Image (spheres, grey):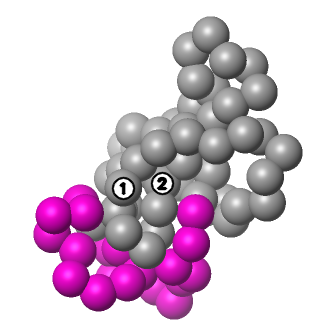
Amino acid sequence: TIDELQTIMVEHSQCHEAPCIAPVFRPTQSFLYWSATTLTGFSDIAEIGDGKSGYVGNGVKTAAFYARTVRTGQ
């Protein structure tokens, strides 16, 4: 989900160099990452996290972005 993805991302206001992914998860790409969260009311759009800037947004599901495996809890 986008909530899980955000737990490994560095907030855009705190990110001073790309990638904006927590160092423990590096090496990684400074690019867009899919979440499993579909945008409400738009079945063809999912939420994404920008590994370069730390921003969260959305993208059309046919776009070619990266994916990370993440989970909450233990």
The amino acid at mark 2 is Gly
Pointer 2 or 1: first along the chain: 2
Left-right relation of 23 to 39: left
Start-end of magenta stretch: 11-32
Instruction: Using the rendered image of the protein, determine whether residue 31 is visible from the camera's viewpoint.
Output: yes
Q: Residue at x 47, y 44 (%)?
A: 57
Percent of width and height locating residue 56: 41, 48
- Which residue carries the number 2 mark? 49
Observer-nearest residue: 34 or 71?
34
Left-right relation of 56 to 31: left
Circle number at residue 70: none
Residue 48 sits inside the magenta stretch: no
Circle number at residue 55: 1
Callout 1: SS: loop
**Given the current orientation, which residue lies at the most extreme top position?**
41
Q: Residue at x 68, y 65 (%)?
A: 66
